[in-house]
Image (cartoon, rainbow, N blue to C red):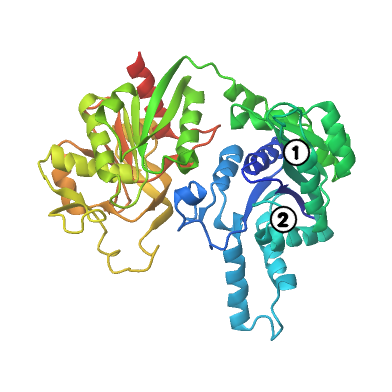
Amino acid sequence: MQRYVVITGGVMSGLGKGITTSSIAKILQSMGFSVTAIKIDPYVNVDAGTMSPFEHGEVFVLEDGGEVDQDLGNYERFLDVKLTREHNITTGKVYQRVIEKERKGDYLGKTVQVIPHITDEIKGIIKSVSLPHDFSVIEVGGTVGDIESMPFLEAVRQLALEEQVIFVHVTLVPVSDVVGEQKTKPTQHSVKELRQVGISPTIIVCRSRKPLEEKIRGKIALFCNVHEDRVISAYDMDDIYKVPLLLESECIGEKILSQVGMKKKAHLKKWEEIISRHMKKEVRVALCGKYVHLGDSYISIKEALKHASFLTGVKARMELLDVETLDREELSQYDGIIVPIGYGPRGAEGKIGAIRYSRENGVPFLGLCFGMQLAVVEYARTVLGLEKANSTEIDPKTPHPVIDLLPEQQHISHLGGTMRLGAYEAMIVKNTLAHRLYKKKSIFERHRHRWEVNPAYVKRLEEGGLLFSARSPNGVVMETLELPTHPFFLATQFHPEYTSRLENPSPPFVGFVQAMGKKKG
């Protein structure tokens, strides 16, 4: 039988189910098990690809090009694994597959219903993804009681009749401002909702500001019908990477294993050593973006900086600056500048201004995707004198389209058809900054973009002092650029933040943080 740990959530969204899922998976992995993680998103979108960052936070890109929920980014960062698009199950994806089967006659004329056809499809995906692993940790998105989550909760209820399933329910224990005590009623009602769909939690993870009081732990156990030692105190931590240590201090891994008749100890010493490293200095990073009103829009960049900080001992504190209201003088307060992904003309000129400031003032710069494209635009305008140079995404009529769709892309009109998604190979030029950072001739990094550096301008740009230090194997696509005369000026067409891990930080981010530390003195 397969073994599953199913994480559900109650009371409200945003309690940290994703970090709880990642942490439990990490604990099981540290015990020597092969572990994978699955995210169920009840929204009707087939995937996260068309969602605005304001709507659902960052869209994370997987190795196979899957555009998925940001929680899968946390799964990869904690487990240091590569997941696939099949690890993200959405309502849209499930219904699309069932309807396609119905149209082909796969159901032999039967009336297609939520039970069993939709629930069977959900279970089929879960089992297929989980097959090679000892444990699969499944996060059911949304909140128990939401109508959108019902088919998924029914599917995992059925799964428990067929396989070994441990249910972990994440809930909230708030503090009343009036009396100043922790309240259990929200948890009681949440567990009641869960039971109404036929699921009784084995373990309850209680999110709270401060450690759970023992009398509160006992009350939750009594009213929610679980053993007292199965009520886990998951109080607020100042860093998400401390959560596995917190949960394991309450022996959650051993309690999960006891449900399947196994006994092992977690080994998180290396993890603890990494996050306990002393920071020798602190630097300030300006992230110049346009989705700054929701911090989760740039979560992978934030985490990649943190990974690099743990490795280098230089604490990089990222601050979000709105490029639509950016003042160049404001940038003088920062030790480094990042210009991240973006689409469309809004905010582009502000980003170009930030790039110019970093280039002219020797401030360490890291451009990511759109940031690389705008670095080319800025250089063409300011250094080469091509005054109206631009990307055809921003100005289709620019006389100098230094950024353009490649010829094979231009005839494709449907949304997503021109996107370059997932991992692609890049060949690195020797004796360059990129080569010193990666220490490899060939790398695979993840992409999410349409427009490219126009090959017709590459020679002119390089003759003007810009260096394209990595290219696609056929030499047509420019993958990285740098400025040899600058202390640290690097831009990548790909997204190195997607492959950064706590135990294996991204080379461009490590170099960037080191450069800021050096500049700080």
| Left-right relation of 454 to 57 | left
Residue most toward the left? 385
Q: Residue at x 87, y 38 (%)?
A: 221
Q: Which mark identifies residue 145?
A: 2
Using the rendered view, name the quadrant where residue 163 is placed.
bottom right
Q: Secondary structure at mark 2?
A: loop
Residue most toward the bottom? 109
User: Which numbered disc, 1 or 2, marks the residue closer to the eye?
Assistant: 2
Residue type at numbered disc 2: Gly
Q: Residue at x 39, y 24 (%)?
A: 284
Expressed as whole percent of the image width and height from the top left, the position of residue 42 reads 62, 58
Q: Residue at x 37, y 68 (%)?
A: 414
Residue position for label 1? 205
Expressed as whole percent of the image width and height from the top left, the position of residue 136 reads 70, 49
Residue toward you, 195 or 19: 195
In this rendering, the answer to whether 486 lies above or below 190 is: above
Expressed as whole percent of the image width and height from the top left, the position of residue 330 reads 30, 27
Residue 509 at least partly seen? yes
Residue toward you, 425 or 94: 94
In this rendering, the answer to whether 224 lies above or below 96 is: above
| Left-right relation of 108 to 231 | left
* Mark 2 burial class by Cα count in 10 Å: few <14, some 14-19, many 20+: some
Residue toward you, 458 or 99: 99
Quarter of the image containing the C terminus?
Answer: top left
